[in-house]
Image (tube, rainbow, N blue to C red):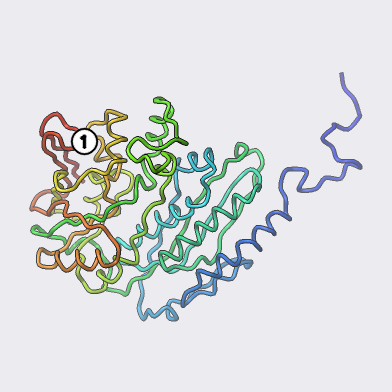
Amino acid sequence: MTSDTPSSNTPPGGSYTYEDAGVSINAGNALVKAIAPLAKATARPGATSELGGFGGFFDPKAAGYTDPLLVAANDGVGTKLKLAIEHDRHDKVGIDLVAMCVNDLIVQGAEPLFFLDYFATGKLEGGVAERVVAGIADGCKQAGCALIGGETAEMPGMYASGDYDLAGFCVGAVERGEQLTGDAVAPGDVLLGLASSGVHSNGYSLVRKLASDLGWKLERPARFDADRLLIDALIEPTRIYVASLLPLIRQGLVHGLAHITGGGLLENVPRVLPETAHARIDADLWEQPRLMAFLQAQGNIEPGEFARTFNCGVGMVLAVGESDADAATRALEAAGETVLRVGEIVEGKRGCTVRGSRGTWAAKDEWETTHLG
């Protein structure tokens, strides 16, 4: 049966507005006004952090550079966002977004200069976007970079109710000739690890599968820390290492840096090694964090698999000369880092070997796993 009567979804008079399609221009404008002070608070030399234009300007000369190489990185937060959305933990995922980008810049010797974000959702509601951007601004302040712009996209039908996604884009600079390429890494170098703050932003598809399959009660105290809810331990934001590492890099104490993200220790360390250098990491050298032990035990994860899935308590690895290891350790500890001696560089094919004794990472026997590349 057909009818000429307009559908019930047709506005009176048949005149449509953008809001009838689910997009509120007013909400978008209100969001820009709400986050403008957050962006302004991240201003640094070279940037004004004024929002509202079609693009953001940055002046490297005003930032103190004479002949800079620009280094760019972009990333997201991954399925960690699902935990944030499902448990109303929106305030710190913005820190993760910044961290995943700026930590990738610092490993190349670059100082993060400015950041832009992309926030996409089906409908702007409940102040969620403001909370997320507040976290982004916090991360930018920790990293010393300016939040100079971004994009908020309201796209009905693209996302389930309450869902959103994030992407971040960051540009840094390093004076020509001072960039870290890994070419300086050589046999005899010491590998220092900087402790992670938790799972960081990788491996959450497995974390969420374990939570679902094993029926974790995320809003209850964690088995490994009765003073903390399990969800809060899992959602702890990625640590930003820029402020503690930049002085050492500029002093020439660092030969190479690896940000431990997807692929874990096993696959990330080789990315910064020359062809004739092999990293040997000894898991006996540091105590496995209780959160990591919990994840491994809950999933009955073999040590080799664990080493290529999670950061294992180490968020960043430095290669430094043996004679500089003590000085680097003291400087990093003074900057607030927990420094772990995790291994060494030996002669061999580019790659990484992680090994442990019986009992280390709950292993029933001595174990060793290698990745070449």
The residue at 37%/39% (across/down) is: 226
User: What residue is rendered at 30% in x and 42% in y?
Assistant: 310
- The spot of residue 312 in percent (x, y) is 26, 44
Q: Residue at x 43, y 55 (%)?
A: 74
- Extreme residue in the top direction: 1
Tell me where residue 204 sits by quadrant.
Answer: top left
Q: Which residue is mark 1?
A: 304
Residue 146 coordinates in the image, percent (x, y): 48, 68
| Residue nearest the viewer, comparing 55 with 116 | 116
Instruction: Assess disc 1: are there few (<14), some (14-19) or many (≥20) residues with their C-alpha within 10 Å of its C-alpha.
Output: some
> Residue 27 location, x and y as percent?
70, 54
User: Residue type at mark 1?
Assistant: Gly
Q: Give the camera-side residue of 102 and 218.
A: 218
Answer left or right for 11 relative to 371. Answer: right
State which quarter of the image contains the N terminus.
top right
Of residues 90 and 350, the one nearer the viewer is 90
